[in-house]
Every structure is written in C-alpha cells, then in structure tokens.
Amino acid sequence: QITLKESGPTLVKPTQTLTLTCTFSGFSLSTSGVGVGWIRQPPGKALEWLALIYWNDDKRYSPSLKSRLTITKDTSKNQVVLTMTNMDPVDTATYYCAHRRNPTGGFDYWGQGTLVTVSS
Amino acid sequence: DIQMTQSPSTLSASVGDRVTITCRASQSISSWLAWYQQKPGKAPKLLIYKASSLESGVPSRFSGSGSGTEFTLTISSLQPDDFATYYCQQYNSYFTFGPGTKVDIK
C-alpha cells in the first residue's frame, strides 16, 4: 500500500526559504521508472506542478519557478525534500507530493497535502 | 510552455446524465494526457492516463479519448459521487494542469 505524507512549516515569512519533506512508504525510489513530484494549489485555484525527481536522480523543475526550487531524495529514509526560496504571499497554497509509477502515466498516489501560508 | 484549457469551466448536471469535458493543449502532446478528479479538501485522484487508459479501480463509466491537441473526458452516467472538479494534465513536456471543470448538481 503506497502512502505519502507532506510535512513542514504551516507559516513562513516573506523572503524566507520553505523546506517541505515528503515521507513515503510502500515503494522504493530506487525502482526503475518511479518518480516523486510536488504539486501545489492556492486556495480556490488550480493545480500547479513544481518539481519531480526520478529513481535515477534525474530532476525536472517548472520553468517558471526553476530558479527558486531544489528537489532532493534520500532513498534510505524514503523521503523527498523540496526547498523553495524567497517565499511570497502568492506562494500560499496547499503543497502535495505525489508518486508516479512510470514516465508514461500520471501521478497515481498523492499525499493529503499541507497548507503553507506566507505572511509577515 | 504548453498551455492547457478546459471547457466548460462549470457544468451543471443531474444524476444519470452523460457528461463530457473537453481539454485542449496549445500544441500537440500526442497521448500524454491524464485526467484527475478532486473533491473539496482532498487530494486529486488519477482517473485516466495516456489519454484513454483507465486507472485501476476507477469505475468504467469514466472514459477518455483524443490525441494531439484535443481530448475529452466522458462520464457515461453521472453518479452522486462524481460531483467534483476535474483537471486534465499534460506530460508531454514537463507537466501542466488545466484550469479545472467543476461538475455540480443541476
């Protein structure tokens, strides 16, 4: 049974760096084809993909946010970490991590999401 | 960047109705398209991948079709559990979600 759970601060100040951790179980991020991504959703708005890391440590970033994002994995801890620098109130959103079983499909398992508010 | 649009933005329907949602890509994405269902306060749920492949465990009343730039999600007979927001997502080049289609009760 695949599960994912996001953790991190619920409130960050403008200009600060956000660090979110996705802790997962039920799969290994060393299995060929597997990826874990981050997606966010501002309140009442649509989903926005942020970043994805593959089993082979290949990384992909949203072109519009690339300069602010870093995604890493710790296979031994079953964790994926996303950092986003220079946070702004417009970054207030629910942040999800999600599993992708292979490059031909979508995100098939999602965490419950964590709401991050950016405010001074 | 590939942009995604969906129509309609809101759809009012009744239980038993056949519902169709359209998704368009700004350039060809072959069949690299997924559909998700999201209910308020919940994470999205994958329904369809590769444009027309039904995800395991998803009821067969959901179907997807299309290729290139135009895609559809069809619910053959709307059930009470289907009132939700639906998103398309391309994964031909990075990932882009559509703006969503809310299906509500008529």
Image (cartoon, coloured by chain):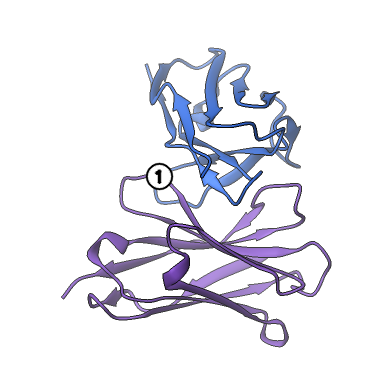
**Chain corresponding to blue in the figure:** B
**In which quadrant of the rendered view does residue A94 lie?**
bottom left
Counting from the top left corner in percent of width and height, residue A112 is at 50, 61
Q: Secondary structure at mark 1?
A: loop
Regarding residue B67, the answer to whether it shows in the image is yes
Relative vertical location of residue A95 with respect to residue B100 in this rendering, above or below:
below
- x, y percent for residue B15: 50, 17
Looking at the image, the residue that sits furthest to the right is A32
Would you name the residue on which mark 1 appears? A46
- Residue type highlighted by circle 1: Ala
Residue extending farthest left = A120
- Total marks placed: 1
Q: Indicate the position of residue A97 as horizontal and vertical percent values.
A: 55, 64
Residue count near mark 1 (Cα–Cα under 10 Å), binned few <14, some 14–19, many ≥20: some
A48 lies above or below A5: above
Compared with residue B88, is residue B106 higher up or lower down, i.e. above or below? above
Q: Position of residue B75 (x, y in %)?
A: 60, 21
Q: Which image quarter holds the N terminus of chain A?
A: bottom right
Quadrant of the image occupied by residue B9 = top left
Residue at image position (42%, 71%) is A68
Specify the quadrant that holds the C terminus of chain A. bottom left
Name the residue at the top extreme: B17
Chain on which label 1 sits: A
Residue B96 sits above or below residue B5 on the image = below
Point 60% across, 41% down: residue: B90
Which chain shows up in purple? A
Q: Is residue A58 left or right of residue B81?
A: right
Q: Is residue A92 visible?
A: no
Q: Residue furthest bottom?
A: A76
